[in-house]
Amino acid sequence: MERHLWSAADILRGAMDVTEYEGILTALLYLKRANDEPDDALPEHARWERLGDPAGGSLGEQLHSALSALGERPGRERLRDLYAHTRFSAVDSHRLARLIAHFGRIRLRDEDLAYPGMLGDAYAYLVESFADAAGRKGGEFFTPRGVVRLMTELADPQPGMRIYDPCVGTGGLLVSAAQYVEEHGGDPNDLTFAGQDPNHEAWSSATMNMLTHGLERFTLERADALTHPMDAGDGFDLVMSNPPFSMNYRIDEVPRLDQRMPYGHTPERGKADLMFLQHMLDMAVERGGSVVSVLPMGVLFRGNQEQAIRSRLLDADVIEAVIGLGPNLFHGTGIPVCLIVLRSAGQRDPEQQGSVLFINAENEFHQGQAQNTLLPEHVRKISTAFHSRQEIPGFSRIIPRDALAENDDNLTVRRYVPEETTEEQQDLQAHLKGGMPVSEVTQKLSLLASFDLEPSDLFAVRAGSASYLDFRPRGERPNTASLTAVARRREQELRTEFEKSWPTCVERITTHLSQRRAEPHARPALAALRVALTEAVREPLFSVGLLNGNALDGAVAGWWQDSEHTLRSLAANGFPAVVDGWCDEVEALLGRSDSPHRGDRPSALGRGEAYRHPVVAALLPEFLGELERERAKKADLDAQYEELGPEGWSADPESKSEEDITRREFKRARREIQERIRSLEKSFSLTAARSRLDGDGLRAVVITVLRNDLAGRLSEKIAQMRDELVSTYASWERKYGLSFQEIEDRLPGAAETSRALRQTPWSERGSRGEQDEKASVLFNIIDAEKTIEAEEAKLEIKQHFVLHPVLGSAAKQELESSRLSLGEILRRFSYGVAVPLSTDTRGTPVVAARNLTADGLDLTALRYTTEPVPAAARLRPGDILVARVRPHEDRSPLRFAVWRGEIPGATFSHAVSRLVPNKDLLLADYLEAWLRHPRVLRQLKVLSWPIERELLNTDIVLPALEEQVRMVHAIGKLAAERADRKIELAKVRLIRAALRSSLLGGDA
């Protein structure tokens, strides 16, 4: 359904602004649904088959007439103008005809849908997709799914409630409340919903959202909540809303001002936030209800009238909680926001009265390229802290009323729940004399315990000292490989326990489905199943001690969100229907069915997405394995073929015929592999594999897909902890693994420093004499820093001087070398791939311009792409990478690096170029050293971007390979010494900064 709607959007693409897509598509969806439902009262001129009748006028006029007629049915009068604003005239008749034909390919009766509510879920997907595309305009009416879910869990709606949203937008909060009640076994039709919005499109969208989710008891009005509040009747039990931020308003247009806004009035210009909040509370007060609202952070600290309103709200004891959220969660705005939870006066739990719960959730988000998101694990952590009123250091805290008054009723979350300090600790004695502070190791004992490690497993115990441990001798210290090996043993324990607990999960899923079939009209309490599954997995895995409770809860919550639709489908239709649906989706992606899922996507992308579908791994694992092996062979052949260079480009013209023969052999081998891949893909058939399965086999497929998804999420959490273990030890070694005492032993004239180091007691609050000793050491450290800098500078000169002969005028005669252009001695020159990049490590690593530094490659901030990358763009050892510091900016400094296969399967971005040397004539390390030489850099700096032609035309003196090897060896030896000096320099500067801060205070 989602794919069908997105394909419909493709028909409109380019014809109108993206903000207008939704109205046209949802109007057709609504009309088609009404036609497919058995309804004897459907007006004749609303019937789908009449669309396109030449006697009915233009297609746009016919659609308006049909949609208006739907509102003529008894009890449907409120829908008469639902799509009166839709501009069908903005779409030419040809596109409209294609749209009508596209929607005509599907039938939308209840029995055609995978589960009840599927149409509503697809509609919500459509709304969210267009909110993404519309940016700021979309963000005016749409609240992101993660925020909606968090607000709903905080509100905890119950059956029978009256629920209201004064700025209803697309109606997501009301629908979420209904779904929450249904998840917990209640009847969503037992709820009464109300909302209003002055925007016609928002009202239409919200109405459609309610209808597609099967909700009938709702009243939505087109009106501004401040100036034209709807009749609340006897009030509402719950109000949830995301009002427009910092909106202007006019006090004289607000009716019953003092009654509705008893806590005060805000300035009219850009300060309507607290007026909306008071309106919400007024709508809930009659029934003693509660309010959950999104607001900009400014309402927490702005002064004058807003401060007075906060004080009165606090005095009335109606503010229950304030929750600070992370940045960039909303479409079109990156401003920080908060959630405020209110409870009507006198309705708070007696134990909670007179205090406010503050939750600092500003770091609880998943960072995306354009927008951040709240994941299920973040929602669970925040809502759990709220409902338990649990105080967690650095996350949540309960503040009494009198403490708030002392701060002038400033409710800024960070004031009461400051972030835990992330500043790295520095121990002066460890820096200077060596050793690992026990105090810092103690802070990571829980991490070490997760992997069954003791401090003594990483360090040697220092005799006579309880405050410091010793690093083991170099070569015996833990490293990435050894720590990873330790981690994997613990990971295997967790996986073993998971395999033991999974059958219990299967039993509980089966029991849930059996109950559903036994009571077909009962509402499945999905929340009960979620609790049962969480218990089945959480306790056994928690007992292993590797993953903590938050990590486990996050993995299960994320798995549940992705699996919920599958479980709904199982409850409604059983295992065969779910597998059939998956197979149909895969076949449609491959373009092999008449399903409306088919889109105009490139075939390679469609195949990649199809083969990644989890049902393929479950049904045809052998196919995937064989396909991967053949693709690997082809990629290897492609890479070898590229080493030959293009036809006609040969370093030795006499060898051209031999290279041409080799090319022909490679082409033949590549064709054979490509033919095997085509044959393999042609034989691919999920339908055939599915037909060989009986009921038990189909059940096993679904269970396998569910299991693999949860196992994958647990593996992600394990990988995060493993990375933390490795990076923690690396950080300790970086700070303290090389002491200043070791450094100064290598420096001339260091006796004075050694004496001071041996004699200084290093108490943080010592006498004036001890502080003088510290100052003396600081002065010696500064002298040592200058000495190391001088040595490093000399080594740099020596390193470049090795190449001096090849840059001289007599180089050709002295070295028996030739002077050739780079183009003559390169196999090839190519630019990188232009693909979208992200931090998702499940994709292909991409080396970008910023990864090339003056000292070589820095891969600590690597980006990834999930787009297919041609084998030709894969990096191979010996490739030279070149990029400007500021890509595509002329005169920007150039950076070069040799790729040595640091990361398997990596590629490079479009802002990076690759030089592939002819290995028979040119060493990659010699070329890199030559390119890095200051004299050459001055020549290259003037080249414009792109630099291909100028760079290939640049001459290089080419000594014999034996001479290149000698030079590279000499340069490498000097480079290693420079690297040692740089490590020492970084260490000395770190100590100098820490010591200076200790003596003088403040930053270094």
Image: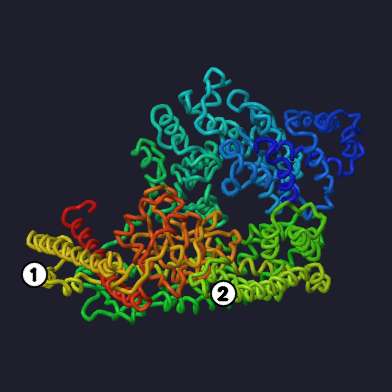
**What residue appears at the point 82 percent right and 29 percent down from the top-left corner?**
61
Q: Secondary structure at mark 1?
A: helix
Q: Position of residue 101 (x, y in %)?
A: 83, 43
**What residue appears at the point 53 percent right and 31 percent down from the top-left corner?**
278
User: In which image quadrant can residue 462 be found?
Assistant: bottom left
**What residue appears at the point 31 percent right and 62 percent down from the top-left corner?**
933
Residue bearing mark 1: 752
Q: Position of residue 207 (x, y in %)?
A: 72, 36
Against 500, is 584 above or below? above
Figure quadrant of the C terminus: bottom left
**Marks 1 and 2, how far apart at CA:** 67 Å
Residue bearing mark 2: 659
The first of marks 1 and 2 along the sequence is: 2
Against 156, is 72 above or below? above
User: Does residue 570 show up?
Assistant: no
Which mark lies nearer to you, 1 or 2? 2
